[in-house]
Image (cartoon, rainbow, N blue to C red):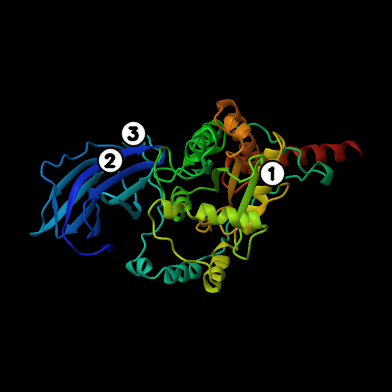
Amino acid sequence: MAVLPCFGADAAEIKQLLIETSATGTRAELRLDKPGSYKLIPLKNPERLVVDFPESHLARGLALPKAAGVVKSVRTGQPVAGTVRVVFDLATQVKAIPTEIETHATGYTLVLEWPGDGQPVTRVTPVEAAPQPAAAAVVDPMLALVERAESVKVSAATPPVAVPTPPMEEAEAPIVLPKMDMRAGVRPLVVAIDAGHGGQDPGARGKNGTREKDVTLAIARELARQVNATPGLKAFLTRDSDMFIPLEHRARKASANKADIFLSIHADAAENRSARGSSVYILSTRGASSQRARWLADKENAADVIGGERVRVSDNTLTNVLLDLTQSGNMKASEDAASHVLGGLKRVGNNHKPDIERANFAVLRTSDKMPAMLVETAFISNPDEEKRLADPDFQKTLARAILDGVDRYFARQPPPGTLYAARAQAANATASSGKSAAIGGSR
């Protein structure tokens, strides 16, 4: 049982209950007019999630939502006087992502999310969600960071399959692996695609009114389509609609869906309207690689302020040391993956920066279990690039370039148990067989 604060203890009215399902799973919203407190009670046999609101009441004539996604039905009751109980009957065993409280001018919204693939409930696959934060973690963010740092473990899993490395002068040439369909015993690599901004946070705006949040969602959807069409890969969208998601929850949603890589998609802006091209950034807690990288990180990190979230101050030595501990296992992987994505973007057009940039991006701070990067696809502040960003053909080109980098990265470093690893093993077996035949024929 988890008891979580919700901005105070005054009586609150539950004004509305909503449920929706999309490619990211099932999302429930409980809208209140005042601060209050709530209690989460997960129950089994059958699977249910109970939410109690002490000192609260339902709005008169409140309509209950119909079944959607993993939620089979919604019921309300009153276990004790003055307490409202909302029961979500679930179709399968699936853990909820840590709850979020969204603050609006008209009240507060408690958000519950169950990760999944957006398919009918009969096909929902349980996933291992991120652990529910303890009450102390909400009160003391530093304690939460310490606990996370102490819980970091270096995986002792089977090392990745070795892939023949081409000569240095051909290092950027694609590795040709044998074609192979998905089969029993292998899993798809999950590519988490995060469309930057959303909801009340529009992001940057072009001269002709194009909004960054719309462009990033369109590119993210196109990239997801291409990823899902690639054998051995599966896409996960952190958002598939115009909704606001706090920065720290984006990579956590990806982790809850067992993502192997995290790509946050953006469209850059600059005072100089002639600035153009793509850039790729990775996390750095020890200073930015350039003044512009630092400025961009500060600008992107302000998204939570626009969205009404409380921004946790993390610009101090202890916090950065702890972030270094949690991120040390994947810093090199992020650099390798980002290099390949940057290379893919170079092959379809000019890059704004020839090398990977580094800065302390909040959206990347919680991506400690997978390589992660922030991709600035083009400058929405450049009138020519603004038009191209809104063009579906250019969106497809950008998506292909990013996917090309992801494909090359996993072809060179395929995680065990994946189709990419199986293809690499087949390539090695073929190479070994040919070498043996050559040796035998020379005798």
Sequence-wise, the earlier of marks 2 and 3 is: 2
Q: Quadrant of residue 79?
A: bottom left
Q: Secondary structure at mark 1?
A: loop
> Mark 3: which amino acid?
Pro
Viewer-side residue, 33 vs 51: 33
Residue wearing tag 2: 19
Q: Secondary structure at mark 2?
A: strand
- The quadrant in which the N terminus is found is bottom left
Viewer-side residue, 108 vs 305: 305
Extreme-left residue of the structure: 81
Res. 75 in view? yes
Direction from residue 333 to residue 300 in the image, left or right: left
| Alpha carbons under labels 1 and 2: distance apart | 42 Å
Sequence-wise, the earlier of marks 3 and 1 is: 3
Direction from residue 392 to residue 121 in the image, left or right: left
Residue wearing tag 3: 120
Q: Are dots 3 and 1 in contact, CB under 8 Å?
A: no
| Alpha carbons under labels 3 and 1: distance apart | 43 Å
| Alpha carbons under labels 2 and 3: distance apart | 14 Å
